[in-house]
């Protein structure tokens, strides 16, 4: 296996291990964790931007608005994920990222007018059956999973028309969110509810480190995707939710009764059909 393959596997493995990291700051309100993640990611990206001497691209109003939409969507996704991990919904986060490729398919049909082969329609139908079973098992729709899949899928759709290179685009996204995030943190501190510098030093370190933890897998992914076939990267993406599910069951002991198993099995069969069809017909899309 090539170096690029292992870089891609490392990126998705780190994403899969994210619950371990965000559990370390579970005592901090999810909104503050998100704000710190945005601010410190922006700082880390800024350092890389300057170090690599990247030229600042010319920006139009359309470009700024496009990346603002992308920034809001990824911010929603990050918030849902951090909140879910802190409230012991890691099983649902794994489900969300399992069904994201199928949500991408539906968005392609509804928004872009793409046509699907019967195998993909079957995969989508099976995933819908799986969600229906889980809705019955939970007593309500798996809102976290659906929210994660919808936000990340729509983020990917927006990024399909994004004109900037990956690094420049990511810097712009985080920069657009950084000022509101910083303002929120300042307001929380003045109100006496801020966690940063008002608790254990380890918590402060983990909040700062959230920026680095966010950027490292993105850089690994960017390096891998240049040399690894997109079909391989598309299959590697299932590493992340699988690791999350193993953590949820083996480490955090979240409930996973028979009805939930049945729902996940339906989703897994759907993903096998989807992966086989994508590999046979065309490269799988990569995450934004």
Image (cartoon, grey):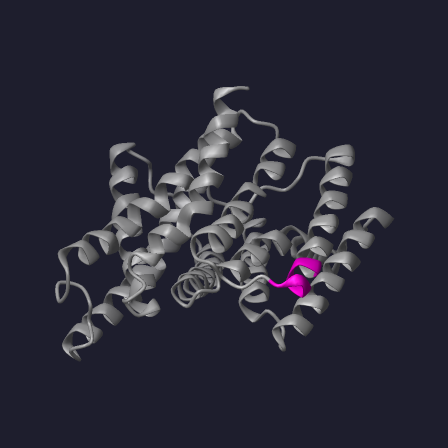
In the rendered image, residue 29, in percent from the top left (x then y), is placed at 30, 70
Q: Does the magenta-highlighted stretch encompass residue 281?
A: no
Name the residue: 62% across, 37% down: 235
Residue at the farthest right position: 118
Looking at the picture, tell me which residue is in the foreground, 263 or 174: 263
Is residue 288 visible from the viewing direction of this image? no
Question: Residue 57, image x and y in percent?
Answer: 38, 43
What secondary structure do most residues of the magenta stretch adopt? helix
- The residue drawn where x is 56% and y is 27% is 228
The answer to whether residue 197 is visible is yes
Give the residues in magenta.
Answer: 257-262
Count of marks placed on residues: 0
Can you tell which quarter of the image residue 87 is in? bottom left
Is 199 on the left or on the right of 72, as rendered?
A: left
What is the x, y in percent for residue 193? 20, 76
Q: Is 7 situated above or below 136?
A: above
- 39 w.r.t. 224: above or below: below
Q: Is residue 261 magenta?
A: yes
Residue 264 falls in which quadrant of the image?
bottom right
Q: Residue at coordinates 43% horizontally, 52% vertically from top-left?
A: 251
| Residue 117 % position (x, y) | 84, 47
Quadrant location, the N terminus: top right
Q: Nearer the viewer, residue 150 or 48?
A: 150
> Residue at point 33% right, 45% down?
213
């Amino acid at each position: 296996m090539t170096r690029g393959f292992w870089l891609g596997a490392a990126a998705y493995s780190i994403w899969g291990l994210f619950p371990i990291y965000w559990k370390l700051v579970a005592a901090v309100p999810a909104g503050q964790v998100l704000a710190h993640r945005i601010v410190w990611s922006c700082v880390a990206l800024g350092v890389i931007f300057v170090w690599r001497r990247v030229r600042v691209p010319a920006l139009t109003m359309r470009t700024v608005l496009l990346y603002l939409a992308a920034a809001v969507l990824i911010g929603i996704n990050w918030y849902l994920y951090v909140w879910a991990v802190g409230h012991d919904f890691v099983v649902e986060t794994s489900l969300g990222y399992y069904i994201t490729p199928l949500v991408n398919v539906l968005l392609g049909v509804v928004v872009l007018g793409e046509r699907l082969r019967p195998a993909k329609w079957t995969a989508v139908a099976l995933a819908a059956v799986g969600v229906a079973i889980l809705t019955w098992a939970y007593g309500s729709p798996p809102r976290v999973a659906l929210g994660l899949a919808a936000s990340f899928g729509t983020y990917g759709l927006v990024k399909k028309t994004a004109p900037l290179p990956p690094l420049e685009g990511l810097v712009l996204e985080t920069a657009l969110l950084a000022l509101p995030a910083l303002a929120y943190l300042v307001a929380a501190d003045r109100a006496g509810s801020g966690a940063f510098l008002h608790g254990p030093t380890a918590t402060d370190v983990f909040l700062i480190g959230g920026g680095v933890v966010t950027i490292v897998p993105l850089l690994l992914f960017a390096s891998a995707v240049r040399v690894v076939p997109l079909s391989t990267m598309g299959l590697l993406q299932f590493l992340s939710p699988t690791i999350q599910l193993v953590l949820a069951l083996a480490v955090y002991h979240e409930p996973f009764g028979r009805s939930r198993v049945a729902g996940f099995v339906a989703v897994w069969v759907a993903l096998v059909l989807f992966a086989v069809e994508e590999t046979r017909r065309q490269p799988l899309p990569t995450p934004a």
